[in-house]
Image: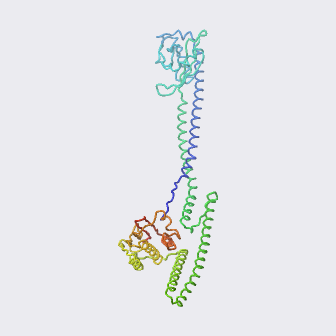
Amino acid sequence: MKGKQKVFKRRIRTKLIIVYLIPTMIIFFVFSLLVFFLAKESLDQEMGRRLTAIAQAAAAQIQAERVIALGIGDEETRNYLNLREKMERLRELANVKKIYVFAPDHRSLVDTDTDVSIGTRYHKLASDRNELRQVLEGLAVPSTLFQGTDGRFYKSGYAPVVLEGKVVAVIGVDASATFFENLARMQRNMIALGTLASVVVIVVSLFFARRIESPIDRLVVSAKNIGSGDLSTQIEAASTDEIGFLSLTMEEMRRGIIERDRNLLMLQRGIAHEVRNPLGGMRLFVDLLLDEVADPAQRENLNKIQKEIDSLNRVVDTFLDYTRDLEPDLHPVSPEPFIREILPLLSGQILRNNIELILDLDGAPEKASMDPELMKTVLLNILTNACQAMPEGGTLRVAAGSENEDLLFAVSDTGAGIARDELENIFKPFYTTKESGAGLGLAFAKKIIEKHGGEIVLESAQGEGTTVRLRIPVPREE
């Protein structure tokens, strides 16, 4: 039965992307905002100084008494036309949108915009009342940015028109805040640059993640092979960094396990042979005693001793079979005749235990790749266990079928079953749920099936019986 394995998700490339991308984007975003606001503030202040300087220059070129003398309907007078002409020349020279003069009550006196007549109220000035309050106190100040009817941003500079120490009018200069368009363009460029940088970070992260994950994936495969008992694949160090060091360490561990297993196997075989030799001597002396002893009671005791010696010999033989290296002689075998040849070997036990035998072999494939002698050992062990699980009778079902192009054996009994906490250990060597037996039968069967490239699964529940399923590969046509 396969143990449950914990599933690990791939997180290295995700972590690398997060580690690189998030700090990069945060730094870039903060830097972009900082640059944007610093540039905006600097350009805003510079434009304000420029507009107030133009306003002051315009205020110095006009005569205050001539300005305040204007009234509604004076647009065609020489005085108005001269003032407007001066302001128009200054507007063209300064490259601003317009220059205008208005009274403290926000009504127009002179405007380079011909559509604005004398007495027109500038409603936009209401938003600059704080700045205009300072202008009326004799200061030249810029306005805040505002959006014109054309959707573009503008800024104004104000300067006082003074007569005899008193502010009698205010001159204003409006100009388009073109730097906002430049800032917007710069912002779009920085967004594009940030997107490009993010893509570069992701690509670089994926590249380095791949460089890290590839050797780790190989180590994971090697670790799984070692965990499953496959010690034949050498672990190579693909780098000289920590991962390479880990690979070398795992390779040393693999070799150490192989050496330990080899030494342990030699020790086990040596012990088994040392046990077999005195058993052979004991068996010989029991046979001699049987020839010399005539008393029936003593002969019965000697027969019991002989039987126990034979039982120990079988345990030693099974143990030696389990510890030797298996190299199955695989060749195509017909499953149905193969099973029918094995069942008569158990006929005595089946009849003795009053077991009903059910065969279902119709679905078996024509051929399967197996070693007949080794598979015979497997099936005899499983069938014997099934018969022993039903000493008072029951049903033994033997089925063979095909699933996913593989041969599937299934042996089911209606015996007492196996407790759930014992199922995890059922294939471990020397573990048994019976009063007698070495506990090597199922472990040996599992080893043989895996050498065939197959799988063995045992399902059982107390009071419901046990089912053992064997999966054996079917030879593929080339």
Q: Count every numbered label the image shows and give the total.
A: 0
Viewer-proximal residue, 70 or 102? 102
Query: Residue at position x 54%, y 65% from top?
Result: 225
Q: Is residue 89 above or below residue 287?
A: above
Tell me what residue is drawn at x 52 percent, y 55 percent: 8
Asked which colour scheme the image uses, the reply is: rainbow
Residue 135 vs residue 385, the one in the foreground: 385
**In the displayed structure, would residue 336 be above or below residue 171?**
below
In the depicted structure, whether residue 200 falls above or below residue 332: above
Q: Residue 384 appears at what percent x and percent y?
A: 44, 75
Task: Say which quadrant the C terminus sits in.
Answer: bottom left
What residue sits 51% from the left and 56% below the top?
7
> Residue 326 appears at what percent x and percent y?
52, 75
Q: Nearest the camera: 198 or 82?
A: 198
Q: Position of residue 327 (x, y in %)?
A: 52, 75
Residue 443, position as x, y percentages in the image = 50, 70
| For residue 295, above or below residue 61 | below
The quarter holding residue 247 reads bottom right
Which of these two is toward me, 81 or 29? 29
Residue 271 is drawn in which quadrant?
bottom right
In the picture, residue 383 is in which quadrant?
bottom left
